[in-house]
Amino acid sequence: MDKFRSCEDFAESKPYGKTNKPTISEVIINFVFFLVFIFFFRFISVQPGDDEIFIGLTQQFSLGEFLLHYYSTWSGRIFNNFLIYVFAKQPMIMWQIFMSLVLTVFGRTLYFFFTPLVDNKFWRKATLLIVCYFGVFLFSSAVMIPSVFWFTGSFNYVVPVAFALVAYLPFYELFYPNDTKVERFWSLSIVPIVCTALSSEQVSIGLILIISGTFLLAKIRKMNIPFHLILLFLLLVIVSIVSITAPGNWLRLEQETKIWFSDYSNFGLFERITLAFGFSMTAIINQWYYLMVLLWGASSVLLITHAKKWYTRLLSLLLFVYALVAGIRFITSLNIIPESSITRNLEVLFSFPFLLGPNLVDTATISVYIFWSLGLVLLPITWLLGLKQEQNGISYAYLYFVALFLIMASGFSPTLFASGGRTGFVPNVILLIILIRILLEIKPYLVLVTPTIILILFKMMTLLSRWMSNGYFVDYGLITMKNVFLK
């Protein structure tokens, strides 16, 4: 089949899976990925702490009592708690099968979003499949393990994110309608909408922001927004409010503040903003380096191929420098280089002490903050300059700021240091979506798709190696900042 002239041509063509042969192929592909996920989950065991606590509580309460108890005393995440209750009573293999299905749905839904943007060449579809299904392996262990490969954590992060992706499908149809007439079955979206709204606050708020941006973009393009989409959006907002305002959320906040960060209540607004900023920078640079290396690198290549002016070439070079420096952080995370004065000096580039407190902040610390802040700002600037057509650059920049907002919001929680890397899972999914979209913009396609797949395979192999040799472990990815507790 000849290459489609545009995304619109592809969207108006006969949809993939319409005939029997592609349908069988899709089933086989999904089953293969499902088996790979099952293979990984078979290494996982119940962990001390939250896993054992929740399993014990399910023996004391009925389902209704359990949900009401937690809504009133601990958490408004009714959907998450429902799943924990159900699977805590089952053999571990049931959770492993369920999670493998969730990751398969996660990958298949991502692939569906990008299908209209890729031609019919086998190698392009194959690489896109790998990146969509195995994209979570581009998250560092500190982010991925407590969000995906941990019994309790998985119900609070990857499961609601998968439901949120499915819930977004009818809104996606605004821009890429096809012959399947999804709008006829819009009422089916009520289930994933409600499940998302009754899950982790990061996920529901993130979906609300993304759908709001979708409506705004539709208005900019002078598109009609169907009434049923407005109803779904209002349902999401209303149910999310019910979840977020649960009495248990405020009681938990009060209790956990005393346990994890009792001094937090003494912080003023400016101090809290400063702390959240430092926490966010630490998370992005020291835990998201897989994705950040690729985003800076892909954006550099994208800009130099889409714009030819001198300042765009300079900007492309700066992005490449940031990709290299972030690459150093990736290398140091492997612990393959012997400690020396050079490695200790390099660590200064990745340290973000608290900017307030009794100790004077040195010039090097301020310089590090400025250096990385500039690198983060350059990304949306690049997309706005290099992708002016159809407001694509605006879309990427908006998604990017949603991701930054979600991690910054986590920094305002007094449990920020206890929650650790899992707070980066939802923002990482958004960055993954941006990355895949940029990779599809780059010509030649394999310039950065190849290293992306290599990084995915590398991460998969290192996980298997560690789990086979040392046993399964939960890397909570705790984030610490110097001088915070010295006020």
Image (cartoon, rainbow, N blue to C red):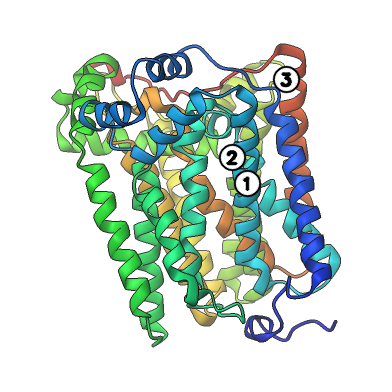
Image point 71% across, 37% down: which residue?
37
Dot 3 crowding, Cα within 10 Å, few <14, some 14–19, many 20+: few
Residue highlighted by disc 2: 289
Give the quarter of the figure containing the N terminus.
bottom right
Q: Compared with residue 106, is residue 262 higher up or lower down, i.e. above or below?
A: above
Q: Give the spatial CA distance, label 1 vs label 3.
A: 23 Å
Q: Give the spatial CA distance, label 2 vs label 1.
A: 6 Å
Image point 62% across, 82% down: which residue?
179
Image position, residue 114 (x, y; %): 64, 66
Q: Residue 386's image quarter?
A: bottom right
Q: Amino acid at mark 1?
A: Val
Q: Nearer the viewer, residue 190 or 446?
A: 190
Image position, residue 194 (x, y; %): 36, 53
Residue highlighted by disc 1: 293
Q: Nearer the viewer, residue 390 or 100?
A: 100
Residue highlighted by disc 3: 466
Image position, residue 113 (x, y; %): 60, 65
SS of the residue under disc 1: helix
Image position, residue 184 (x, y; %): 48, 77
Decide if residue 205 is on the left or right side of residue 161: left
Is there any visible trace of residue 366 in the rendered image? no
